[in-house]
Image (cartoon, grey):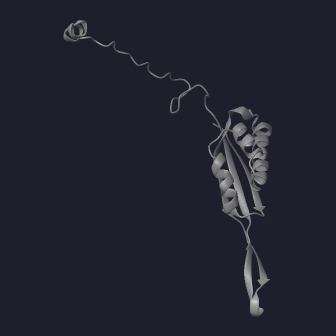
Amino acid sequence: MKQVQAKARFIRMSPKKIRLVINLIRGLDVTSAESQLRFMRKDAAGPVLKLLRSAMANAEHNFQLDKSGLFIKEIRVDQGPSLKRWTPKAQGRATPILKRSAHISIVLETKEDKNAPVGVKAEEKPAEKKTKTPKIREKEVKNNKK
C-alpha cells in the first residue's frame, strides 16, 4: 500500500476552526471527501480542499496511482506561529490579540481491494459458513397438528 503526503503550512486561520472541518472527512475516500468539502459552508474548507487536491495530484503524477482507490489515512492540524498584536482598551490600557496560524498535513493511502472484507487479504477467501437445517422434533410436530 502506497502512502502519499502533502502539507500546507502557515495557513492564517485558527487550528481550532480547521479541526471542525477535518474531523468530518477523516477516514473517507478522496472523492466523497472532496464533494463534502466543496459544499461545506466553513471558510476552513477552502484550504483543506486545496490540500486534498494537491495530495491527489501528487498521487497521480508522482506515483501513477488512480485517485478512485485512495482514502484519507491521516489528517491533522498543528499550531503554527502566532502574530502578536495589541488593541486599545479603556483608561490607556492595551490587550493582546493573537492571530493564530496552522500547519495541515494529510496522508493518503491506497485501498488493497474494494471487494475484500475488512481484515482479509486479497489472496485469501473468507471461509464459507455451513448452515444447519433446523431439526423438528416429533413432539413439536404432533403439538402443531392438534
Please identify the residue farthest to the left as the structure is shown.
Answer: 139
* Residue 74 higher or lower than 81, as above or below: above
Residue at image x 50%, y 21%?
Answer: 125
> Where in the figure is residue 15, as x and y percent of width and height?
69, 62
> Where residue 19 sits: x, y (%)?
66, 57
**Place of residue 32 in the rendered image (x, y in percent of width and height, measured from the top left):** 70, 38
Number of callouts: 0
Q: Which quadrant is the C terminus positioned in? A: top left
Is residue 16 shown above or below 26?
Answer: below
User: Which residue is at a point 63% across and 51% down the rendered structure image?
Assistant: 23
The furthest residue to the front? 146
Q: Which of the pair 107/37 is nearer the observer?
A: 37
Taking depth in this image into account, of 74 and 28 the one nearest to the observer is 28
Residue 123 location in percent, x, y?
54, 23
Relative side of 138 to 129, left or right: left
Q: Foreground: 15 or 138?
A: 138
Instruction: Residue at 66%, 55% (x, y): give it.
Output: 20
Above or below: residue 124 compared with residue 20: above
| Quadrant of res 64 | top right
Taking depth in this image into account, of 21 and 110 the one nearest to the observer is 21
Name the residue at 64% across, 41% down.
28
Quarter of the figure that contains the N terminus: top right
Q: Tell whether 65 sits left or right of 121.
A: right
Where 15 sits versus 75, above or below?
Answer: below
